Image (cartoon, rainbow, N blue to C red):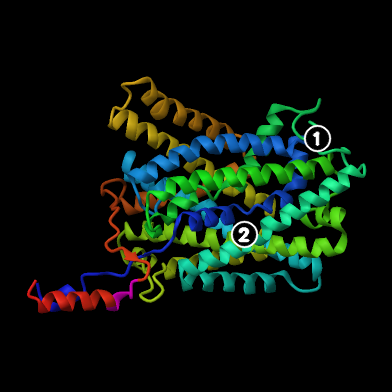
Amino acid sequence: MTATSTLTAHPTKLRRSLGLWAIVGLGLGYMTPMTVFDTFGYVSEESGGVVPLAYLFALVVMLFTAISYGRMTRIYPSAGSAYTYASETIHPNVGFLVGWTALLDYLLLPLVNALLVRQYFESFFPEVPGWIWVLGYVAVITLLNLWSISSTSRVNATLLVFQVVLIGVFVILAWGTLQQGAGNGTAFSIEPLYHANVQIATVISAATIVCFSFIGFDAITMYTEEAKDAHTVPKAIVLALVLGGVIFFTAAWFAQSLFPVSEGFTEGTALPEIAYSVGGMIFQIFFVSAAIAAAAASSLASHASVSRMIYVMGRNGSGPIARRLSYVHPRFRTPAVAVVLVGIVSLGAAVADLDFVFSMINFGALIAFTVVNLAVILHFAVRRREVKTAWQIVRNVVLPAIGVVLTVVLWLNVSSQAMTYGLIWLAIGFIALLVMTRLFRRRLHMSLQEDEVIAEGDEGPEALLEDDRQRLTAGE
């Protein structure tokens, strides 16, 4: 081997720099705890006044799926998430379609956060055109994601703590307001969970909306190639989901206790009105600030996640487009082209509609969740034939099968508009698949190879080159 070939044998790849709690924080930031207030009016109307029950139902569904994600990420420690699992356990063509469908929700999540920020600022500065807020906000988020994943994690953690503290203050203020006779008059009423007009169909319909809030635990798998220890990722998935579920349920309980009926909220986010009702103008300002922090934290995490997914799909593809999408910045070690692409899509927040985007996100996410549960059954029960004991049957068949059924139930209850446009998006992906495979005559390439892992604290390409020089000098 020549000196030149040796010195160029180390392509620039992602940096392993994230610990357990950094990944949990990114997952929680992605989930955006403040979203419970943004969607409260819409979900309360849809569920018939039992928002906490809708969150509880969605949490149960997500727990089964989280277990499946945790198991699959141990087998396939790649940033590709559901795309990778489907490609390896079913077929690369199926994996592409799953990845394509998942892109629908992952690409739209950063857009949703930019849209929420636009609405927050418009509530205080109605005379300023909304596109100005969107342009400035998206530019900052994109630049932070280009900088480094470690910096993204630190900023995300700060913003996450701020919003959780403000949610705690809301709970305290809401408690006092309830004690004064507002709403149900007590925080201990069963009304937020059940009353005479509750219907299972409306609860399921509402759960399809709030499951959007839990999207984030699955995105954690996309940090697998940047985790200091890939084995921490399954733990982070469950921790983020449970902690997020507790926050969502608690906030929804007190909000529903204060507002047992959904009438009175203006169109769009209900958050500013809820904040004003419990703490007046001063608290409203702080609460909206926390909501902006929440949106920023979610933007950072979701932007980082989807750019990693695009990077992996590009790395596994061929041609000039795939090469550009898989480009990693040699200094920052971030998928630069993918990051910029997500920023461009996020600019759509200047004209998008919130309720419609929520529904579209859930369409793609629920398909990915269903396939990941199926992947567990195919990998462990079919391929490995681990069904010899009762525990293996429960673990490898029963639990993921329950996850499949529950996610399919939610998917069938998304809005008709979201179903229509979601299927159109899927059809476009299928056409793209036909072109790439030349009508299925050519097999798609799928590789889990990371090529080179950069540990936290490494000097970068220069360190690798110096190492090569030393080995060449020693005659290796």
Q: Dot 2 lies on which element? A: helix
Q: Looking at the image, which residue is at 69% across and 54% down? A: 34
Q: Residue furthest left?
A: 475
> In the rendered image of this protein, does residue 475 appear above or below residue 60?
below
What secondary structure is found at the residue carrying circle 1?
Answer: loop
Tell me residue 362's x, y (percent): 58, 45
Residue drawn at x 87%, y 59% is 280
Q: Is residue 48 magenta?
A: no
Image quadrant of residue 397? top left
Q: Answer with the quarter of the image where residue 183 lies.
A: top right
- Pick whichever, 295 or 471, lies toward us: 471
- For badge 1, the amino acid type reads Phe
Residue 47 vertical position relative to residue 463 in the rendered view, above or below: above
228 versus 442 height, above or below: below
Percent x, y of residue 376? 39, 35
Numbered tag placed on residue 188 in the rendering? 1
Residue range in magenta is 458-462
Q: Name the residue type under label 2.
A: Leu
Image quarter where the N terminus lies is bottom left
Give the camera-side residue of 388 and 338.
388
Residue 157: tell me if it is visible. Answer: yes
Give the percent coordinates (x, y) of residue 274: 81, 52
- In the rendered view, tell whether residue 130 sits above or below residue 404: below
Which residue matches tag 2?
Answer: 160
